Image (cartoon, rainbow, N blue to C red):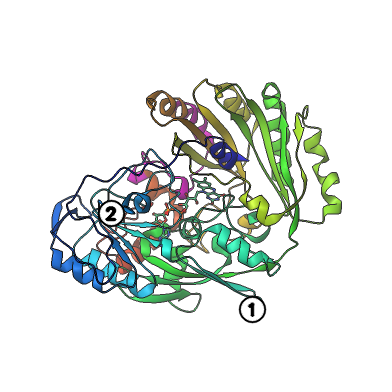
Amino acid sequence: MHRRRFLKSSLAAGVSLSLASRNAAAALLAPSDKVLSDITARTGVGEEVTLGKAAVQELADSLRGNVILPGHSTYDLARRVLNPTIDRHPALIVQPKGAADVQNAVTFARESNLLLAVKCGGHSPSGKSTCDGGMQLDLSLLRSVRVDPQRRVAQVTGGSWLGDLDHESMAMGLVTTAGTVSHTGVGGLTLGGGFGRLARRFGLAIDNVNSVDIVTADGRLLRASASDNPDLFWAVRGGGGNFGVVTNFEFGLHPMSRTVMAGNLLYPLAEARQVLNVYAEYAASAPDEMYVDGGLVSRPGGFSAVVLHVCYSGDPADADRLLAPLRKAGTIVADEISAQDYVAVQRSGDISDPRARGVYLKSGFASKLTPTMVDVLVDGFEPHAERGAFVGFQHAGGAIGRVANEATAFAHRHVQFDSLFVVDWPVDAASEEHVRYVKEYFAAYEPYTDGFYTNDMSADDTQQDIDRNYRGNYKRLLSIKRRYDPTNLFRLNANIVPG
Ligand SMILES: Cc1cc2nc3c(=O)[nH]c(=O)nc-3n(C[C@H](O)[C@H](O)[C@H](O)COP(=O)(O)OP(=O)(O)OC[C@H]3O[C@@H](n4cnc5c(N)ncnc54)[C@H](O)[C@@H]3O)c2cc1C
């Protein structure tokens, strides 16, 4: 359940293709096209800079992929990110077709001091994969997955989506941990950690990465693994996009049955306290193969419910016995659990681009869910005529917690519940009331949290919040950042400021 269905239900309207107004030349620059004028752009620290047309032409000529300038018919589609309230206009967009293109684009951005955004699936809720006036490196032409069933590994290029990985791997009877919405980028999700329906069983996405190919700020293409550049390998597993552009991930895969027992259980909102207290105990002691997200949902128009979303990847013969406590937790309004295809479950919450709904979220990790925390959740939940809301948890624990905090850069192995407070509203309506509501609601809950998921960072998290959130791993991350990105070229992320 959680943000997938919540966001899915906010479907509407088509895509705005209004032409960008900034900068003169309108061009998608295949190698033979010409740049017609200089370009005004922004540096990483926000100063204005002019990119000479000859220099941009040289960049374009050096690529197999595209340079897209404002005014071109593909510009708006390329710059777009999932959250429609984020509407930024890069000075130029580069769409690389391979690692060499990434190297050329990164080198150009560094030499021009450009603000640089890296976009994979474009899901960053706070819009870290786009920018105003800088270069957006749009990895959408770098989508491919190659599975080696003998070695049980998948080679996944840096712009791929989770659905690409699930589809190709499961065709060989293999899987690895991926998130719960198939059009989320492998790049952003993995580098920040990577929770999903199989994480309790196989660990976070980062726990399944064998190696990465990465273009660092100096333009080099490096391999990072346990034996090659091990510091960098440690840092990219939880340190986000701070260290470079990953052009390829090698994931380890696991054999798994294609059929899982999955679906939602719905209960009346009036029973929220009772159901969530049962859920809290259940989730903390469930077997690793059992994944249950829980929460409260409301939609404009009056629908509201307690929802438990289940995905059980163990022996189907055990499912009914294991699910019995949840089925007894309250009055079942709907029981949608059935034997399902895992890849279909992974796609079940996909969003057909909700350009019509604005979204804002706050999040926090919790190692337990106490009756007091349940009270805060239930007391603050206010269904609303215009606003949709989901407040609840992505189920963690299991294998995630059996890795030491210092083994990778991800320092929150204690997490049992990734708490999410999400609201949506008609994108043309005033957002203030809805954003204020969720901020105040979350403020009452936040004292019970311990850190947050950097991938769900909100725009108002301060630098101090971010530094502190890396916990005991911050110092090592800082020294690796200073070595690989001393000028902070890669700053649009949960940024480690090299200082
Ligand atoms: C609908 C929805 C569902 C979600 N479900 C889950 C979930 O189940 N589990 C979970 O863990 N998280 C989930 N998330 C959060 C998700 O992990 C983050 O939004 C993540 O940033 C998405 O990655 P992306 O590539 O789509 O994002 P983008 O916005 O494209 O990128 C985000 C960041 O990652 C960096 N980045 C991306 N690709 C690369 C690359 N190849 N090399 C270097 N840096 C790169 C960028 O610099 C940027 O800072 C969800 C988010 C949404 C909106």
The residue at which mark 2 appears reads as: 72
Q: Residue at x 66, y 76 (%)?
A: 149
Few, some or many C-alpha atoms within 10 Å of disc 2 (few <14, some 14-19, many ≥20)? some
- The x and y percentages for residue 243 are 37, 64
Q: From the viewer's perspective, tell me whether residue 87 is left or right of residue 391.
A: left
Compared with 95, 466 (above or below) is: above
The residue at which mark 1 appears reads as: 151
- The residue closer to the viewer here, 330 or 464, is 330
- The x and y percentages for residue 14 are 44, 40
Kindly indicate whether the residue at mark 2 contacts the one at mark 1 (C-beta within 8 angstroms). Answer: no
Residue 134 in sight from this viewpoint: yes
| Badge 1 amino acid | Arg
Disc 1 residue lies near ligand 1 with CB under 8 A? no
- The residue closer to the viewer here, 157 or 362, is 157
- The x and y percentages for residue 277 are 70, 32
Few, some or many C-alpha atoms within 10 Å of disc 1 (few <14, some 14-19, many ≥20)? few
The span shown in magenta is 440-464
Indicate the quadrant where residue 313 lies: bottom right
Q: From the viewer's perspective, tell me whether residue 341 is left or right of residue 428.
A: right
Compared with 420, 268 (above or below) is: above
Q: Mark 1 or mark 2, which has the lower sequence index? A: 2
Does 445 appear in magenta?
yes
Indicate the quadrant where residue 394 lies: top right
| Badge 2 amino acid | His
